[in-house]
Amino acid sequence: MLAQQLTLELDVTRLWLAFTYPGAHKRLAGDLPVDQHRQVPWHQIGRPRLSAINTLWVVLKRGPDDLLVAEAERVLQHPLVEDDTISSLNSAIAVLVYADRLESAAAWCGRLQTAATERHASTWNALFTSTRALIALRRGSLRCAAEAAEGALRSMSVEAWGVEIGLPLATAIEARAAMRDHAASAELVNSPVPPGLFETRFGLHYLYARGRHYLATGYYDAALADLIECGEKAQEWDLDSPTLAPWRTGAVEVWLQRGQRERASRLADEHLALVKRGRRRTLGGGAAGPGHDAALVPAGGPAGHGGRHAADRRGPLRAGPDPGSSCAARTSSRARPRRPGCWSGKRGGWPARAVPRGCAPR
């Protein structure tokens, strides 16, 4: 029994390292076979934890499908809510998010967050609030996404978050950028982050979001640098999927702004191919959700896109105000792009409201 438990803990740790620090894991251990733990015997003690973490890793590496979604939901249907299971339960919800099963993800996240609140478990609550913010972003609820993400950031210190701060920070940046709340997104972008963030999958979320901020504020060189870096890392780590960070859509907008239509068209075609492949796996060729055939670029540009990412469902950020957002406040001056400094380790510092209402329209 002890040997079984030790083997389980080693497997869980190895998979956690593989999808949290993919670059470091690849250097240390090489590529892990995708199907190594695909079929996990449920009668073995502790296996739901391994199943949830493995399922997320497979989704990140290969994309979602119906079997992986079902496996994640089986884990969530038999939750043992304890300190050592919170990460795996959150991983199971992440599978649903990346598979675009947002209604199911929101329901499970709400139940688990209620359990966290009842137990006065602030760390659990922060993690589930961050996940709830990501779900809201992908459903197009920008204000809800921004406020939930900023609430998650305020609920724990920077030290307590560690590299996982990248997810709520990315969600807040992307939501504020999409709302044209440029002062707020700039304040978030200029917040220091742990240096190790950019070696994690959370760093992919962050680079994509920061690229969207620079794109929305017209700093195309900075936007392209972040989006290309996001893409290069995703490809190097074999995590290049529109469900994680659809970096090509932002790069397409930059190339169109520069009149590079051939480059834009090539990237748009690559994005479409990845999305269509994901659709076939997840839904057997059926529609993958609302807005998946929305245009990627204005009429006359490259082919439309079918990404699952909420910001991309709305099309280019500079096309006009988000119809679902009540916040139309924008800044009269553009935020100067600046790479975040090294992690200061300061506690708190997240504003209760990132930008005053009523800014002059741009």
Image (cartoon, rainbow, N blue to C red):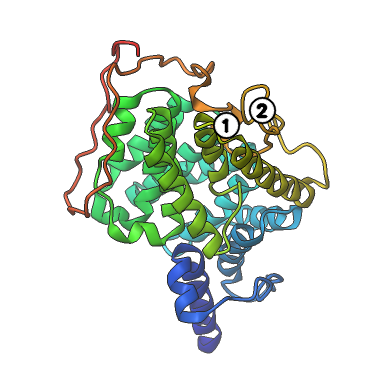
Residue behind mark 1: 139
Q: Residues within 10 Å of mark 1 (few under 14, many from 20)?
A: some
Residue found 46% across the figure and 63% down from its top: 20
User: Mark 1 belongs to which amino acid?
Assistant: Arg
Is residue 63 depicted above or below 37 in this figure?
Answer: above
Q: Can residue 312 be seen by looking at this rendering?
A: yes
Residue 56 tag number: none
SS class of the residue under badge 2? Answer: loop
Looking at the image, residue 23 lies above or below residue 342: below
Q: Nearer the viewer, residue 138 or 114?
A: 138
Report the residue at 38% width, 49% height from top: 166
- Give the CA distance from mark 2 to mark 1: 17 Å
Which quadrant of the structure image shows residue 168? top left
How far from the left and from the top, in percent, is residue 216?
A: 42, 28
Q: Is residue 217 left or right of residue 277?
A: left
Residue 227 in the figure: left or right of residue 300: left
Q: Along the horizontal axis of the image, is 334 left or right of 118?
A: left
Amino acid under disc 2: Ala
Marks 2 and 1: CB-CB under 8 Å?
no
Residue at the disc numbered 2: 295
x then y, percent, for residue 36: 66, 76
- Specify which label sits upstream in the sequence, 2 or 1: 1
